[in-house]
Image: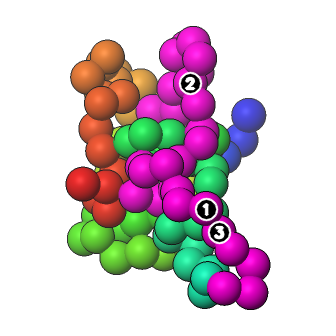
Amino acid sequence: MSQGKYSPAYPRKIKHHKFDRNAYGEIPPPYKVGVDEYDEKIHFVNYDKWGYDTYGYSAWLADGTFVGVGEGVDRLGYTEMDYLSMNSDKYEAMYYYITNDTFKIKAPGVK
């Protein structure tokens, strides 16, 4: 596994973890082709109920700015690019900050 591909706070051990929500962590409304205007924040389904994707990243920066699939922060507040540029010692230390409560942290854009 390369440093950064998966967030250290990726929920590997949570059974029955579903990624059936939109960037807001909500069940999306039905999308009607030709009727509705497609909105990635609302219609793209790849997130869990806390707003994180299958790699552990949100679509939001820490300030609540929408940046798109996999480009946002993880539960620890870092982006994939942050991890890729982080030294190995600091990256490995991230695992010490993870508790069961870490997985209850909502993404910045999730209400």
Q: Position of residue 86 (x, y in %)?
A: 48, 52
Q: Is residue 60 above or below residue 46?
A: below
Q: Position of residue 6 (x, y in %)?
A: 61, 40
Tell me whether the residue at label 1 lies in contact with that at label 3, contact meaning CB atoms closer than 8 angstroms: yes
Question: In this rendering, would 43 be left or right of 75?
Answer: right
Choose between 92 and 49: the one closer to the eye: 49
Which residue range is magenta in the image? 7-35
Q: Position of residue 73 (x, y in %)?
A: 41, 56
Q: Amino acid at mark 2?
A: His
- Marks 3/2: CA–CA distance: 24 Å
Location of residue 95 by image quarter: top left
Choose between 69 and 82: the one closer to the eye: 69
SS class, disc 2: loop
10 Å crowding of disc 3: few (<14), some (14-19), many (20+): some
10 Å crowding of disc 2: few (<14), some (14-19), many (20+): few
Q: Amino acid at mark 1?
A: Pro
Residue 42 visible from this viewpoint: yes
- Marks 1/3: CA–CA distance: 4 Å
Q: Which residue was labeled with disc 2?
A: 17
Q: Which mark is residue 86?
A: none
Question: In this rendering, would 64 be left or right of 2?
Answer: left
Residue 73 visible from this viewpoint: no
Question: What's the residue at 74%, 34% (across, down)?
Answer: 1
Q: Which residue was labeled with disc 3?
A: 31
Q: Which residue was labeled with disc 1?
A: 30
10 Å crowding of disc 1: few (<14), some (14-19), many (20+): few
Quadrant that contains the C terminus: bottom left
